[in-house]
Amino acid sequence: MSNKTTKPEEKGFFEKVKETIEEFWDSTKDKAEELKDKAEEKIEEIKEKATAKKPVVAKKASATKAVVTKKADTAVTKAKTAAAGVKARADTKAKVITAKANNEVAAAKKTVTAVKEKATAKAKAITTDAKAKATNVKKAVATKTAKAATTVKKKASAAK
């Protein structure tokens, strides 16, 4: 009979934390890209409107373009900063959890070693005791055998 379970393996805690971090990172990257794309589209729209109007309007459009570009850059910077913060917090949390797990593993190993040492000591004590008892039994059997042999010899001598 097999000891393997038929249930699918569940993801461990660290895999779940890692996936969560990746999801945060991917979503913030996607948002930053979306903001950048929207800013580029807005810039293109402004360019098209600016070329269709008079040169005075073109000056206003370039000013608007600078503002839009600045706002887009600010939004992208904020998104990157937020993503970096989330990633840093997640990395810190993962390190703390890893350290805690390592401490628990070390404690478990110490416990196993202590139990193993106790079992070895107990086994040695039992073995020593058993050897001593076996030696005593052998001596007693040898003594009884010698007495029985002596008795048999005496009876045999007397019977002759």
Image: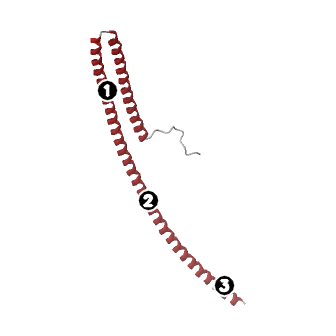
Comes first in the chain, label 3 or label 2: 2
Q: Amino acid at mark 3?
A: Val
Q: Give the label, 1 or 2, closer to the camera.
A: 1
Above or below, 62 relative to 118: above
Residue lying at 54% horizontally and 39% vertically, measured from the top left: 6
- 38 sits to left or right of 60: right
Q: Residues within 10 Å of mark 1 (few under 14, many from 20)?
A: some
Q: Amino acid at mark 2?
A: Thr
Q: Indicate the secondary structure of the residue bearing disc 1.
A: helix
Comes first in the chain, label 1 or label 3: 1
The residue pinned by badge 3 equals 152
Please provide percent x and percent y for residue 152.
Answer: 66, 84
- 153 sits to left or right of 81: right
Residue lying at 40% horizontally and 31% vertically, measured from the top left: 26
Above or below, 148 relative to 12: below
Q: Residues within 10 Å of mark 2 (few under 14, many from 20)?
A: few
Q: Indicate the secondary structure of the residue bearing disc 2.
A: helix
Asked whether 157 or 10 is in front, the reply is 10
Q: Amino acid at mark 1?
A: Asp
User: Residue 73, which numbered label?
Assistant: 1
Please provide percent x and percent y for residue 61.
Answer: 29, 15
Comes first in the chain, label 1 or label 2: 1
Question: How many callouts does the rendering have?
Answer: 3
- 16 sits to left or right of 56: right
Q: Give the label, 3 or 2, closer to the camera.
A: 2
Asked whether 94 or 84 is in front, the reply is 84
Furthest residue to the front? 55
Residue lying at 55% horizontally and 44% vertically, measured from the top left: 4
Above or below, 128 relative to 68: below
